[in-house]
Amino acid sequence: MLKIGGQRVPTKTLVLLASESLLIVLGLALATAIRFASSRWEYAGGHTIARFLVVALMCAFALYYNDLYDVEIMKSRGRLLIGLLQALGVTCIGLALIYYMAPGISLGRGIAALAVPTIMTFIFAWRVLLDSKGFFFLRSPERVLIVGTGPTGITLTREICSRPDLNLKVLGFLDEKGENIGMSLVNPGIIGGLSELEAMVREKNIDRVVLSLKEQRGRMPYRELLRLKFAGVKVEDAHTVFERISGRIALEKLSPSWLIFNDGFRKNRFLLAAKRGMDIAAAVVAITLTLPIMALVAAAILIESGRPVLFRQKRVGLHGEPFEIFKFRSMRQDAEKGGPSWATDGDNRITRVGAFIRKYRLDELPQFFNILHGTMSLVGPRPEQPYFCEMLDSQLDFFSQRHTVRPGVTGWAQIKYQYGSTVEDAKRKLELDLFYIKHLSISLDVAIIFETVKVILLGKGAK
């Protein structure tokens, strides 16, 4: 099972990546064979493999950045076709730039002209086949039984039902008191009582038992669970399963002991030093490359609404220490005269230039100077204003734990959830932030950066 930063990569995504990479190589080989059918083949040897790998890698990036590894897109043939055309267009542009800098690895126009429609046909036909056959070559869904009717189990079931790529099927819930049989909690509902645990596992051929009891004291069926465990049935806690498949740590009924005794939350010196080194290098490169863009943004703000160009605001950082964040001003000068407030849809405080730079995250560019100063990191939880921190700390358990790492320009919560403007939104983002802190690693940071680029290119989630 492949994981990135503690979150499982769906099997179907891996199947798509591997199978389509093979189809791309086959398409290139077929185009090459047709091109040189009546003449000497000049592409023999290791150079051919290198040329094909460059194309396959570029195609994989283009498919990823067009969201085509989201298997739900296969449900719409129109979206799939348009997405593939866009991805192959991006691939051609990217390869043209690569070949301009390294002409020796070019396939040649003749092969490229044959390869594009061939690869397009292969991938589209393959996706249609997989959708129509329901990934027939994969194992049957794992059968899951939820023991208890706690809120985390219900949330977990909703997540599973919305994610067919997980290849999981919830057969039902067991009620702690054996009441409400037949009642629908999500879909399915309660199919039995706690006393029927072993019988239900045998009858329903259950592969995995997930515990989500409202109250564990005096209700945990230890002997039955022990017998099932030794019989080969997987037994897990609902919080653990939910974390693994959703990339969030559910706050409902979350006990401090779960956080204390669970793996993760490690911050060794080497990791922190490597993360800081990556921050400094990325900030220097980013500032150097984006100086012209920053100058244009500053000029646009000056022309539309005058000074100040930069917006400075107190935020809460590492260990709860306040610092001053830098951003390009995207609102009117008097935007917070009535006190701090979250941005909302259609917020009339945002200027026209502000709406554009927020959509493409250009207002965040000055924060690279915060990174150099050491008050922020490239990746981490989004820093909040002191007013909101005090409010949320009183309403959300474990909120202060997000201050155990440096706040970030981007982060797990930013790429997984839209801009938040309510306490419920803040709760969802806290669940994502806790997951990030638990699985803190350079590989997770790199994955977040790749996903951030996609979010910026598609203009998702900004307000």
Image (cartoon, rainbow, N blue to C red):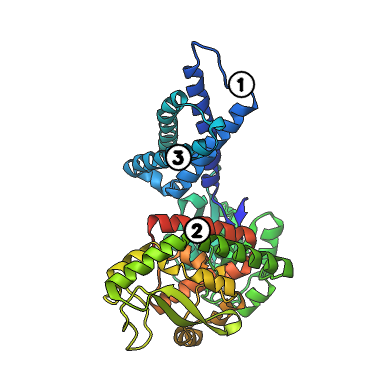
Residue 73 marker: none
Closer mark to the observer between disc 2 and disc 3: 2
Query: Which residue is disc 3 drawn over?
Result: 91
- What amino acid does circle 3 point to? Thr
- What amino acid does circle 1 point to? Ala
- Residues at marks 1 and 2 touching, judged by CB atoms closer than 8 Å: no
- Residue sitting at x 48%, y 50%: 165
- Residue sitting at x 55%, y 45%: 14
Query: Which residue is disc 2 drawn over?
Result: 289
Q: Count neighbours of disc 1 (C-alpha within 10 A) and say few if under 14, some if 14 to 19, many if 20 or more.
A: few
Q: CA distance from mark 3 to mark 1?
A: 24 Å
Query: Which residue is disc 1 drawn over?
Result: 44
- Give residue 341's position: percent from left, percent from top: 36, 82
Of callouts 2 and 3, the N-terminal one = 3
Q: CA distance from mark 2 to mark 3?
A: 23 Å
Q: Nearer the viewer, residue 150 or 239?
A: 239
- Residue sitting at x 46%, y 71%: 428
Q: CA distance from mark 1 to mark 2?
A: 40 Å
Which secondary structure, mark 2?
A: helix
Of callouts 3 and 1, the N-terminal one = 1
- Give residue 372's position: percent from left, percent from top: 58, 71
Left or right, 280 with respect to 183, comes to right
- Residues at marks 2 and 3 touching, judged by CB atoms closer than 8 Å: no
- Residues at marks 3 and 1 touching, judged by CB atoms closer than 8 Å: no
Q: Can residue 246 be seen from the camera position used here?
A: no
